[in-house]
Amino acid sequence: MLKRLCALIIAGATLAACSESSQPTGVIPVPLAANEYVLAQLTCRVDAVASTMSCAPATADRVAGRSSDLILGGQNVYVKLTSTNVVTTPTVTTTADVTVKNLTGQPWNTGDGTTVDTAGVKVFFMQQPTNGVAIANPTGTSMFTASGQPYFKYSGVPLLGADQLLTAGETSGTINWQFTLNGASSFTFGVLIVAKMPDETGTLLWKRDTLTRTQSVEFMQTVWGFSATDVWVGGPSGGPTTLQHWNGSSWTPAGGYCTLTPLKCETTSLWGAASNDVWAVGSEFVHYDGSAWTFFATPAATLRAVWGVASNDIYAGGNNGDIYHYDGATWTALSHVTTGLGTQLVSTIWGTGTSNIYVGTSDPATTGGLGVRRFNGSTWSTVSAGINSARVIWGSGPNDIYAGGDAGLLRHWNGTSWSTASAPFGSSPADAIFGIWGSSSTSVYVTQTNGNLWHWNGSSWVNLPNANMGFYGIWGSGRDVFAVGFEPGAGGVYDNIVVRGTR
């Protein structure tokens, strides 16, 4: 897939804002520069006499043979071009020192995060200046979307620093752009910014939200939603901010949630069949009907996981091997003998349907456990997944399943056998994997308590580290991803946080 970012050209005294282009409708030739990602297109108008400029989205184009469903845009959102030392000699020249700033969460000019790409970060002139104006000093010309297109290339030292990458939040060095006006007093042109990124299908921007808390130590452990504007997050803090809701613009604690059972207020797992049919478990079952949370029943032990096939086919599990089933009216405890769970802690539940349900277990006293159990609709069996302490299970289908656990162990089922995922997830207690979610078999996210957030793009794992944070659950909707966890603060304070990813 080729990506599109909104770019802005500068000529004149000020830098104008730009907006995202509309959905592509036309077709342009396939670029020959296969290692560079196509970025969004703008048309800019320069009034050299008045030293003003305005930009607007150009006629949308689509690269032939390429998917263009992912369109990124916005000056000051993904990219920022800034000019200084602007000099205009009416009817003769306009010059400006221009820098490029990377506002995404990924480094540019690299395919793996460290190896320098020789192509650099380029600003291509897709549409030449009008009214006879010429670009006086391009770095070069090349075939990108058409032959002979001028470009400015930001590469090497000092333009991209010692590492020769434009890392997240970094601003390049300056290149002096020069235009020969040839008597023109105004002109228009269109530009693209192109660069290599490690994870072209992954999330590009991450925004941290620090949620309301009422106690010195709080963290979010679980997340579930139905759209990017309807998301629930919960944690085991025991306070009135243990469960909060995202409406697309702000987070709000669930009113009255803790007053239902004030001594046991916690949320360790969330699952729902609809936006008005959500279950939260911790020390009890609590149900949301779209307007309020209602205490439903009290189990014999603390619950750790909940997942369902439908509103009348839901499973929940917890300490001492307890597992319950909901038929749409009643929660019923299943026999330890029947399930074979013994006294193991049920830490995660996930499945593809009524006849294919997986339960991950661990031992609360040790790091060992039964690992993974499977229910085929009538009987339970042990799955030889090669993991003793399964903290999370998720898959895109019956032949693409991940099980993550302690010490950075991530196992994958391909329909035939289990294998260990190839990424360097670590092997210490701090490297535990508690969250897995994906939109497909080629786009999977993994969270670790050490603060690492990983993305599988179908061919490799890309690390998206977050310093001084720890993550537990993760969930997404379309192009939005929500990772929940904590951030240590001064004086032993821990903030409950959500890191929202968009693209």
Image (cartoon, rainbow, N blue to C red):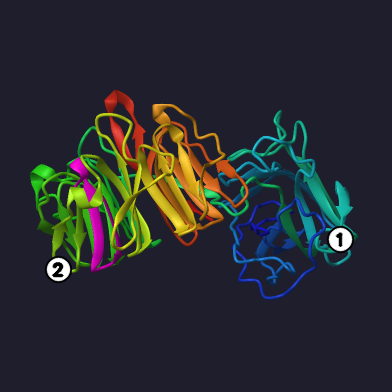
* Residue type (three-letter) at the residue carrying disc 2: Ala
Q: Quadrant where the C terminus lies?
A: bottom right
Q: Please report the residue visible at 17 percent of the width from the left and 44 percent of the height from the top.
A: 302
> Residue 491 falls in which quadrant of the image?
top left
Q: According to the image, label 2 marks what residue?
A: 329
Q: Mark 2–mark 1 contact, CB under 8 Å?
A: no
Q: Nearer the viewer, residue 167 or 266?
A: 266
At horizontal 13% and vertical 64% (from top left) the residue drawn is 330
Residue at mark 2 to residue at mark 1: CA–CA distance: 75 Å
Vertical placement of 490 versus 76: above or below?
Answer: above
The residue indicated by pointer 1 is 133
Q: Position of residue 44 (x, y in %)?
A: 71, 63
Could you tell me which secondary element the residue under label 1 belongs to?
A: loop
In-front residue for pair 155/218 = 218
Tell whether 134 sits left or right of 53.
right
Residue 431 placement (x, y as % from top left) = 43, 32
Which region is colored magenta?
A: 305-322
Label whose residue precedes the other's in the sequence (2 or 1):
1
Residue 42 picture quarter: bottom right
Residue at the bottom extreme, as displayed? 25
227 relative to 284 in the view: left or right? right
* Amino acid type at image mark 1: Val
Q: If the image is split into quadrants, where does the N terminus sit?
A: bottom right
Percent x, y of residue 201 = 59, 54
227 drawn magenta: no
In the foreground, 364 or 490: 364
Asked whether residue 350 appears in the rendered view, the answer is yes
Circle 2: element type: loop
Instruction: Give the number of marks.
Output: 2
